[in-house]
């Protein structure tokens, strides 16, 4: 099988699995509190990622990478999984899955904005236009389409959903400086984040009950949101000669996710969700495609 064909198989597998996790979040939150779900998912992910590294013969890299930059991995573990998933699951606990999903997908729009003060990047006109369009979609979803009376069903849930995108962007920004093995880095973050989850659980909540259905749902989240799917995506990027083609596949994820939410959770998908999600996806498309179109135009004009 050709390398590009493998890339698309890995990429489609990752997209399909990521499309199911919003549904899995809501199912698992029917059994656990947000922090309890973080605990179950992180433990599962640690076991899965450790197994992958043992299979690859790279588990010995854990100690070397940690000792090379202990403060970096401590910061990474605080952001992800501890803070990010705690906030994200709390948002899903308060909001319909369709709303929480849509809000979370604006992280890609926020990333170049935060990169300006934190990485010294320049904000382009394309970034500004994409952000305005995407966050208009957020506003439509948050108000249920009733944009004139500024009425929000769960202001806290919406705030947490948007704050989760800030945390995720911060995690990705600090990881731009990570030169280690990405799977090892992710496992180190989870290993460091787990004690923080446990300590917070013991002081503010309780350890999760041994409910089989709940554990299976939580393990599904750990495997296919945090662990195995990340490895599939890395494999897709490794085998492709056009990373841009892989990134455009991510546009399928929220569309498929809404389908799973409607089918499995039986949520009545509101028109405002469809409209707002279209705005968000348009913003993402503009952000990704407009620079390429401009480059092509510039090349033609220079000929």
Image (spheres, rainbow, N blue to C red):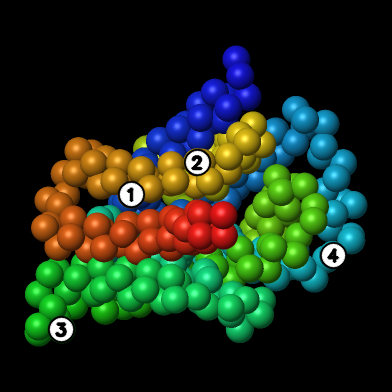
Nearest to viewer (mark 4 / mark 1)? 1
N-terminal-most mark, 3 or 4: 4
Residue that mark 2 sits on: 245
**Is residue 15 visible to us here?**
yes
Foreground disc of the pair 2, 3: 2
In this view, the residue in front, 169 or 94, is 169
Q: Secondary structure at mark 1?
A: helix
Disc 2, disc 4: CB below 8 Å?
A: no
Real-space CA distance between mark 2 and mark 4, rounded to the nearest whole angstrom:
33 Å
Q: Identify the residue at horizontal 53%, vertical 46% (top origin).
A: 244
Dot 3 crowding, Cα within 10 Å, few <14, some 14–19, many 20+: few
Tell me residue 241's x, y (percent): 63, 36
What numbered label is drawn on residue 150? 3
Residue 27 showing in the rendered view: no
Pick whichever, 96 or 180, lies toward us. 180
Q: Residue at x 12, y 70 (%)?
A: 145
Residue 108: percent from left, percent from top: 47, 63
Residue 181's spot in the image, x, y percent?
77, 47
Q: Earlier in the sequence, mark 4 or mark 1?
A: 4
Secondary structure found at label 2: helix
For the point 26% across and 58% down, the residue is 277
Given contact means CB atoms under 8 Å apart, are the residues at marks 1 and 3 in contact?
no
Measure the C-alpha gap from mark 2 to mark 3.
38 Å
Above or below 40: residue 91: below
* Residue labelled with disc 1: 254
From this view, report whether residue 78 is shown above or below residue 194.
below
Q: Earlier in the sequence, mark 1 or mark 2?
A: 2
Specify the label residue 50 is tagged with.
Answer: none
Query: Is disc 4 surrounded by few (<14), some (14 to 19) or many (20+) residues within 10 Å?
Result: few
């Amino acid at each position: 099988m050709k390398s590009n064909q493998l890339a698309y198989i890995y990429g489609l597998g990752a997209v399909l699995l990521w499309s199911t996790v919003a549904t899995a979040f809501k199912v698992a939150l029917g059994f656990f509190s947000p922090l309890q779900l973080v605990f179950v998912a992180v433990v599962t992910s640690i076991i899965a990622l450790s197994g992958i590294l043992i299979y690859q013969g790279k588990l010995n890299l854990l100690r070397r990478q940690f000792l090379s930059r202990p403060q970096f991995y401590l910061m990474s573990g605080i952001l992800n999984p501890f803070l990010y998933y705690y906030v994200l699951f709390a948002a899903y606990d308060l909001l319909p899955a369709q709303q929480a999903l849509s809000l979370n997908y604006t992280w890609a729009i926020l990333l170049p904005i935060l990169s300006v003060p934190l990485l010294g990047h320049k904000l382009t006109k394309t970034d500004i236009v994409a952000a305005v369009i995407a966050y208009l979609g957020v506003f439509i979803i948050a108000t249920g389409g009733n944009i004139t009376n500024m009425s929000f069903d769960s202001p806290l849930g919406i705030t947490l959903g948007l704050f989760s995108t800030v945390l995720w962007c911060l995690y990705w920004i600090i990881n731009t400086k990570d030169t280690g093995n990405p799977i090892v880095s992710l496992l180190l973050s989870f290993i460091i984040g787990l004690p923080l989850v446990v300590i917070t659980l013991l002081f503010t909540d309780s350890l999760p009950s041994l409910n089989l259905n709940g554990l299976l749902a939580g393990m599904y989240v750990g495997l296919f949101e945090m662990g195995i799917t990340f490895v599939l995506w890395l494999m897709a990027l490794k085998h492709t000669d056009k990373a841009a083609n892989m990134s455009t596949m991510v546009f399928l994820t929220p569309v498929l996710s809404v389908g799973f939410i409607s089918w499995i959770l039986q949520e009545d998908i509101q028109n405002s969700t469809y409209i707002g999600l279209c705005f968000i996806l348009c913003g993402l498309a503009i952000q990704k495609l407009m620079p390429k179109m401009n480059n092509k135009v510039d090349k033609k004009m220079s000929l």
